[in-house]
Image: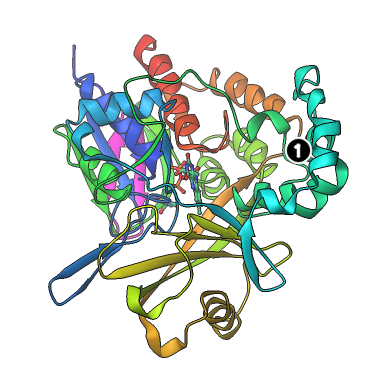
Amino acid sequence: MAQKEVVIIGGGISGLSMAFYCSQAGMKTTLIEKENAVGGSFFSPQFSSNSDKFWLEMGAHTCYSSYQNLLGIVEGCGIADTIIPRAKVPFTLLKNGKVSSIMSGLNIFELLRSAPNLFFLKKENMSVRAYYSKIVGENNYRNTVSHFFNAVPSQPTDDFPADMMFKSREKRKDVLKNYTFKNGLQSVALTIAAQKGIEVHTGSPAQSVSTSGGKYVVKTADGQEYAGDALVIALPSAPAARLVHDINPGLADHFTKLRYADVDSVGVVIRKSNVSLKPVAAIISPNDIFFSMVSRDTVPDDNFRGFAFHFRPGLDDNAKFKRITEVLGVSLSKIEHTITKKNVVPSLRVGHKDWASKTDQMLGNVRNLYMTGNYYGGMAIEDCVSRSREEFDRMKISR
Ligand SMILES: Cc1cc2nc3c(=O)[nH]c(=O)nc-3n(C[C@H](O)[C@H](O)[C@H](O)COP(=O)(O)OP(=O)(O)OC[C@H]3O[C@@H](n4cnc5c(N)ncnc54)[C@H](O)[C@@H]3O)c2cc1C
């Protein structure tokens, strides 16, 4: 039988994990990514000053022992030895100009009064606000916990489905509870892309999809054409809808119903001696112009510290840098490197599972079309890889 040819659009972890599974199964796998490098929300730019090299996470930053499908790929690529622990530094709250622990923002009496609800309240069909107001108390939720939740997908999360925010999954006992990678998460993306059997085309977006002679044909902005027996869309919902429109307007229409949020991330690298802020994993500042600041203090460096601020979209640079220098207590002249990144995250709502099962129903009627991303089972890395695994299993049984 002829070797199956698969074209995958989108080089984030969703597309890359699918590429890994397809190439391992001996399929001829082509992956198209619009940026110059793969990774999507796995973006760990490297900075160098003289002989020093330093990386900073501008998107995802933490993996867990429960990420079993991801770990399977990491092991399959032979890079399990690049897993490193994260230093135990606190997640903090910035209130009235002072950095303190998250716990200090909680009213303990209200917390103790509400916590027993944890044992009988079910998350299904409840919003984050409805569920967690009952678990931690309404005031604790409004004043502190909601801001912590907002920091996870960098947008207001009151209306998110409670059962899609933090999922409990089976953990692997032989792996660190939480970890990162020696050269940042993007090193995982780059390693997957370099696997035998995966052909990667970067630097030009997929612009159209059509069918011809029983194959899917993808055209990119630079005029190239890629044909495959099967097509995998691994994109945020808006570009996914645009591309699918020409081959299946019904599915495209279904995708336009999904909401999403843009996140404007700005990273800064500063010499260690120039920052007096105590080491932190992250700072969450209620009702601020940024949802979170995630630091590199979890992987301490001898010379530099790095901080990624995840801002609400649409702010000008002056406002962003004014706030960065205020929060870090440093002047602009002390910032050695800056980098920006635009991330896209889904805005999930209660009832999202119905949207996802309708997607699967619709896909069941389209030959050799597969869709993965961070808006099926959830937006955590493991949700993306698990979705790819499920779509790959569906692909294996279709001939
Ligand atoms: C700031 C931030 C922090 C996070 N932290 C964590 C964390 O610590 N742990 C965790 O588990 N999860 C975390 N997440 C969530 C997780 O990282 C993401 O859900 C996941 O990485 C998304 O992967 P993806 O491949 O679905 O999408 P993306 O990473 O968005 O990848 C989509 C890719 O498609 C490409 N693309 C778009 N249009 C086209 C086109 N027309 N043609 C070709 N390519 C195109 C994009 O350039 C991009 O590379 C975080 C997310 C963000 C934004």
Tell me, yes or no, if residue 27 can be seen here.
no
Q: Main secondary structure of the magenta part?
A: strand
- The percent position of residue 117, horizontal first and vertical second, equals 82, 24
In the image, residue 43 above or below residue 369? below
In this rendered view, identify the residue nearer to me: 5 or 109.
109
Compared across the picture, whether 119 is left or right of 217 comes to right
In this rendered view, identify the residue nearer to me: 290 or 25.
290
Q: Residue at x 48, y 70 (%)?
A: 277
Which residue is tagged 1?
128
Q: Residue at x 47, y 26 (%)?
A: 387
Q: Look at label 1 and name its amino acid.
A: Val
In this rendered view, identify the residue nearer to me: 222 or 199.
199
Q: Magenta residues, as a range?
A: 216-230
**Residue 220 falls within the magenta-colored stretch:** yes
Q: Quadrant of residue 93?
A: bottom right
**Residue 98 falls within the magenta-colored stretch:** no
